[in-house]
Amino acid sequence: MATIYDVSILAGVSLATVSRVVNNNAKVSDKTRKKVHDAMEQLGYRPNNIAQSLASNRSNSIGVLVSQLDGPYYGPMMRQIEAVLRGANKHAIFAAGHSDAEQEQEAMDFLLNRGCDALIVDVEALSDEYLVKLSQSKTPLVLINRHIEALRDRCVHLDNVQGGYLATRYVLEQGHTRLAFIAGPHEKLDARDRLTGYRKALDEFGIKFDAKLCCEGDYHEEGGYQAMQHLLDAGRPFTCVVCANDQMASGAIAACMERGLKVPGDISFVGFDNIPFPRYISPKLTTISNPIEAMGLAAASWILRQTYGETPPSATPVFQPELIERESVRKL
Amino acid sequence: MATIYDVSILAGVSLATVSRVVNNNAKVSDKTRKKVHDAMEQLGYRPNNIAQSLASNRSNSIGVLVSQLDGPYYGPMMRQIEAVLRGANKHAIFAAGHSDAEQEQEAMDFLLNRGCDALIVDVEALSDEYLVKLSQSKTPLVLINRHIEALRDRCVHLDNVQGGYLATRYVLEQGHTRLAFIAGPHEKLDARDRLTGYRKALDEFGIKFDAKLCCEGDYHEEGGYQAMQHLLDAGRPFTCVVCANDQMASGAIAACMERGLKVPGDISFVGFDNIPFPRYISPKLTTISNPIEAMGLAAASWILRQTYGETPPSATPVFQPELIERESVRKL
DNA sequence: TAGATTGGTGTAAGCGCTTTCATTTTTAAC
DNA sequence: GTTAAAAATGAAAGCGCTTACACCAATCTA
């Protein structure tokens, strides 16, 4: 592999000059620039990223810590982040935290050790204090799916309360009055927020919240399936289930089907997140949009500007959910 | 940040000795080792990965090139790869090739420029010749979902012909004789193989392949949906559809539902890949298993041994698909 | 025309490690 | 107690690049 030295010899200039044309960051005469470009081309020269990083104290890598690398939720976000970063000739190092304090911490250390220039982080178990402290180090940081007031201009998140509210208000408007709720894990902020939105809408319609009709799931199909069994076995009547995400809604619907219940004939469903799959099941799932791709884009752009840009980025916006009306809710 | 130099001063030893204890790769007396460890602890020393890489000509990163970063297929594979690599204190750099020659080439260059120590590659558009040539460079390479005879010991792939065969044989055994097939994109090898398996089973049962009942999709829900519309509109009768993957099967089932056709009452379906979602729709999809996680594991382990291990890895096995019988096929 | 700019280029000192080779210390053998 | 072999350590030369600084020539300014 040709080095910058080889190029400088062939072009008849100094190392420094070659470096300048590679980085395009200082005055070089057109004539010299051409000589260098010709030499680079002739040698098939590729800058050694690692040497660049060491010398410049920049790794050109951004650490991305998410709960999991698979699943319908993080996939699109990662895709967007990768695309934006690669477009800027940076790269992402993805790590999975699995919603567990120890694993999240280990993943953070891993990324920090890797010399990431900045971090995009979606963690649940790490404490606010830790994140605030981390944000004060010189490594830029942006938080996804989390709202910490002290870090508000670097939190990319959805208004989950509003989402829960929209979903619930919609079914109430359709005439349902006996609602059940399949919640996400209570330790997750977004899950709590979605529940808050649910209760807010109930309040607004003067319906009392019934804890017996609120069941906690794991955000996966299986959890929704089991929660639905509980709900059905509890003996309390209801005509509609609001689910804290689409995956649980799918599991819950499967449970109904198994018992011969019609959806939405007997029971109506609203989901949350608008993941691709449930658009293709019958009935098509009415749900709440979650612009995760836009959030990934926002996070990556913010980080690029903050870390490598000349002008600092503006504060990140709070993303707004919207109702996506399909076929899983019956009008009463 | 403390450097190796700081540690050496505090411990009263030379740089070289500190490096030895950090890498644990040469004889160091217990006494010295302890002094160094104490000094490292006291200073909170963390080796600078980038400097290590430059000096040792090892980046400790493995490039992973897949078609896409999202979707039910690659997610689990990436998760597995990340877990294995991180366990070995290496990291993956993921890049998406989008099944397009230009983008795949660009992604390859990107990863190569990044100084990856090895590559795990799932590409469709890049030619066999290119890959063979690449494999002759000093960067170890393993191919996923592809079979190149010259590189057979480093191809991690599923026996897709067998999978297509199993799916088809099963429905034939259930008494179906008029089958349709929704294929994957013909430019993809695995799609062609699955179709080959389908035809093989038809042959075996003495049923003539009918091109009118074979429709190409895009491996996504939408493609399956549209292919199904075609099939239904073609006017040729059939009782069962073999789909080249689960996503298309889901889309196709949605198309049937929309027309009021019962599944499996009117039309039976088999999928392929066993992705999580269709287990939770009604009817539960009968499909062919695809051990993508095991394949990710195999690929990552192979690469670790090949690149950093003392003993070279053995040849990669061909993974075998299995039928997963659920509820979407009616016995005639 | 002297002096001050400015643009273009080169020199060389690192960045924080690894690793070869030489040197010193310890151990074992007699 | 010698002496040779083995074990432990240190000195120093890079790895391929960036960048502060120095330098020289060309261009202005008055």
Image: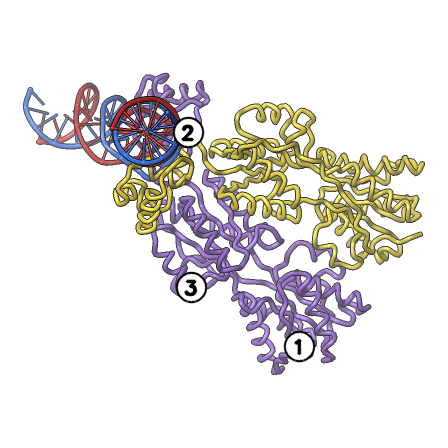
Chain colours: A purple, B yellow, C blue, D red
Q: Earlier in the sequence, mark 3 or mark 2?
A: 2
| Relative side of B261 to A135, left or right | right
Residue to which mark 3 is pinned: A128
Subunit that carries the residue with mark 1: A
Q: Please state which amino acid type lies under the numbered disc 1.
A: Leu
Q: Quadrant of residue D19?
A: top left
> What percent of the width, then of the height, locates residue A77?
55, 51
Say which chain tag 3 marks.
A
Q: What percent of the width, then of the height, locates residue B99?
A: 63, 36
* Kind of residue indicated by mark 3: Asp
Dot 2 corresponds to which residue? Answer: A47
Q: Which residue is mark 1?
A: A213
- The image quarter containing residue B157 is top right
Question: In the rendered view of the protein, which quadrant contains the C terminus of chain A?
Answer: bottom right
Residues at marks 3 and 2 on the same chain = yes
Residue A19 position by quadrant: top left
> B156 or A22, which lies in front?
B156
Q: Residue at x 70, y 55 (%)?
A: B277
Please give the name of the residue rendered at 76% of the width and 38% of the height, measured from the top-left corner: B160
Q: What residue sits 46% from the left and 61% below the top? A: A126
Q: Are marks 3 and 2 in contact (CB under 8 Å)?
A: no
Q: CA distance from mark 3 to mark 1?
A: 32 Å
Q: CA distance from mark 3 to mark 2?
A: 40 Å
